[in-house]
Image (spheres, rainbow, N blue to C red):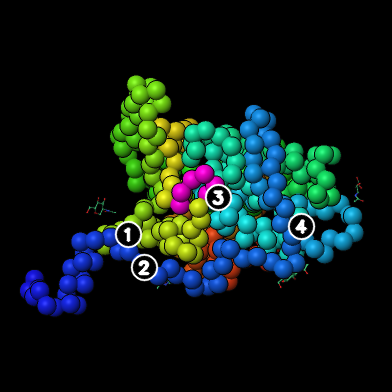
Amino acid sequence: MKIMGSNIAALGILTTILNPISAIAQNMSYGADNFYRSNNVTIHPISFPTQYRTTVAGNLFIPDTLTTNTSTPAIIIGHPMGAVKEQSANLYATRLAETGFITLSLDLPFWGASTGQPRNAVSAELYAEAFSAAVDYLGSPHQTIANVDRARIGALGICGSGGFLISAAKLDPRIRAIATASMYDMGAVSRNGLQASQSVEARMEVIAQAAEQRWTEVDNDGGEVQYTGGTVDELLVNSTAVEREFYDFYRTVRGEVTPRGSTPELTTHPTLSSNTKFMNFYPFNDIETIAPRPMLFVAGDQAHSREFSEDAFARAGEPKELVWVSEAGHVDLYDRTELIPFDRIERFFREGLV
Ligand SMILES: *[C@@H]1O[C@H](CO)[C@@H](O)[C@H](O)[C@H]1NC(C)=O
Ligand SMILES: *[C@@H]1O[C@H](CO)[C@@H](O)[C@H](O)[C@H]1NC(C)=O
Ligand SMILES: *[C@@H]1O[C@H](CO)[C@@H](O)[C@H](O)[C@H]1NC(C)=O
Ligand SMILES: *[C@@H]1O[C@H](CO)[C@@H](O)[C@H](O)[C@H]1NC(C)=O
């Protein structure tokens, strides 16, 4: 390369090659609006206990049009894996409340304002329990904020929460209608990688690292928590398309938040020693037993995660529907309001919660 010291443009390129790409403009196309607030929906911060006496934090969204005290159907919304309810879940909850449903967004245990130590721990079982705990809360006679018809409670899970919700629904027939958006099977991806790209040897290496980290924590009376996976903290010129996709949401003003008691950098990073728990998570086993409760799977036809919706849909019993959003990727369905088929999702719950 012939680069002269005075050549500013060439220096710029050189700097880009050597350094992280900082200050990349976020992509706000197709109506990206993660922090949307409605002027006809009232938000009530809430919390409720799980069966294991941990506390889940949530928001209850009540349509202002619910002036009469009539029993109303409700929808529980779970956020993407490693995120918080302020990321994507509140948006879905708000938009569905605008159509007349009572909605509830929640922070999964160990994340956001929900309790659980250590922070960012992985337990698919406790994540699934949060959905059932939300049903308890909505249908409880002690809950006096909203008049919920406990026979008409549905739920929607985004990304990893799609799998956690399916896991919950298998054991909780009180969840009457089940929808997912950009669903991720955290079990399959942890074991095999995307499109079976991870060998069993590589899986065993990850398991060995987590086990070694346990020794480190034992040897040091707890030790320093190590985090793994998740969204990269900086983009490099060799960053993959998937890394860029997540970065654009979680590491820019498009979707970045500062969770209570945490930092934005820790968003989507589970603890190293607990992340392997996902390898024992098989959310689609027995998925057919959810029938005849209806299931809706929504995914982008360009999504890197589309294999998970396809797999779940193929195994589910009837009635079921798989909706491909044309030209949409995985993260697009977190916040791009012109791509998320809210009308279709509303109709699903309107027909499913009767
Ligand atoms: C912005 O995102 C949209 C939706 O995924 C995509 O079609 C478009 O190519 C992106 N634009 C840029 C400049 O990356
Ligand atoms: C609304 O109706 C429920 C059950 O029908 C009743 O328990 C509750 O007290 C009523 N609330 C108000 C504010 O009238
Ligand atoms: C609330 O406002 C939104 C956005 O203006 C609108 O689409 C929706 O129909 C309204 N909902 C109700 C129940 O008035
Ligand atoms: C990009 O390069 C860095 C080192 O420069 C390396 O650590 C990283 O793993 C690479 N990323 C990918 C996705 O290849």
Residue 84 numbered mark, or none: 3
**For numbered disc 3, what is the local secondary structure?**
loop
Query: Is residue 177 something that shows in the picture?
Result: no
At mark 1, the secondary structure is: loop
Left or right position of 174 against 193? right
Q: Earlier in the sequence, mark 1 or mark 4?
A: 4
Magenta segment: does it hold 321?
no
Labels 1 & 4 near each other (Cβ < 8 A): no
* Foreground pick, 145 / 310: 145
Q: Is residue 261 magenta?
A: yes
* Above/below status of 161 relative to 256: above
Q: In the rendered structure, are the residues bearing label 2 and label 1 in contact, judged by CB atoms less than 8 Å apart? A: yes
User: Looking at the picture, how far across and down is residue 4, in whole percent?
Assistant: 8, 75
Residue that carries the numbered disc 4 in the rendered image: 62
Q: For residue 166, which quarter of the picture?
A: top right
Question: Which comes before the other along the chain, label 4 or label 3?
Answer: 4
> Tag 2: residue type?
Ile
Marks 4 and 3, how far apart in space? 20 Å
The residue tagged 1 is 235
Instruction: Report the side of 171 relative to 246 (left or right).
Output: right
- The amino acid sitting under disc 1 is Leu
Q: Which residue is mark 2?
A: 24
The earlier-in-sequence mark between 4 and 2 is 2
Which range is magenta?
259-264
On screen, residue 8 above or below 209: below
